[in-house]
Amino acid sequence: MRNREKTHSFRTPKNPFGLIIPLVIDDGESFPPEIRAIQGEQLHDYANPFIRLDSPKQEALAEILRKNVCPTIENALSRVPNFSSAWETIAHKQFEHMYKIRAKAQKVVPSLRLPRLK
């Protein structure tokens, strides 16, 4: 997605909008540096998988999403470039390069089986 932003001149002085909308639920430290530099919506207070639907916290989260996140997503969707079948190939090559994954180097780990009790 960052490549698509660059290719279509997003996040520039003339076009400050982007296609990536970071929502930081935990620490955000594992985000790539380019994504960490994008101002993300901080949702740390709502990082609870067991949040009740009728709780004040859920209502506050819904309000943040409605006021801040949904308009940003709507704005991004209105600017999405036309689909290109090359994106998948580009993304795959970038992934391989980033993580230095090569098909030849991959090894299959044998399944671990526990001995059966008699």
Image: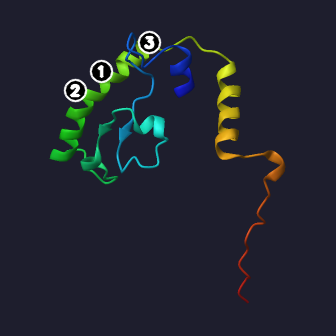
Tell me residue 51's x, y (percent).
Answer: 27, 51
Q: Which residue lies furthest to the right in this view?
A: 104
Q: Do the residues labelled 1 and 2 touch (CB within 8 Å)?
A: yes
Q: Which disc number belongs to residue 71?
A: 1
On the image, numbered disc 3 is attached to which residue?
79
Q: What element carries label 2?
A: helix
Mark 3 element type: loop
Instruction: Identify the element where label 1 is drawn.
Output: helix
Q: How far apart are marks 3 and 2 (CA)?
A: 20 Å
Q: In which quarter of the image is residue 63?
A: top left
Q: Is residue 27 visible?
A: yes
Name the image colouring: rainbow
Return the mark for residue 67.
Answer: 2
Residue 67 position in % (x across, y down): 22, 26
Q: Nearer the viewer, residue 64 or 17?
A: 17
Lower sequence index among marks 3 and 1: 1
Which of the marked residues, 3 or 2, is nearer the chain's N terminus? 2
4 relative to 118 in the view: left or right: left
Give the residue displayed 40% in from the left and 18% down from the top. Answer: 76
Quarter holding the C terminus is: bottom right
The correct choice, above or below, for 25 with respect to 82 in the image is: below
Farthest-out residue, left: 56
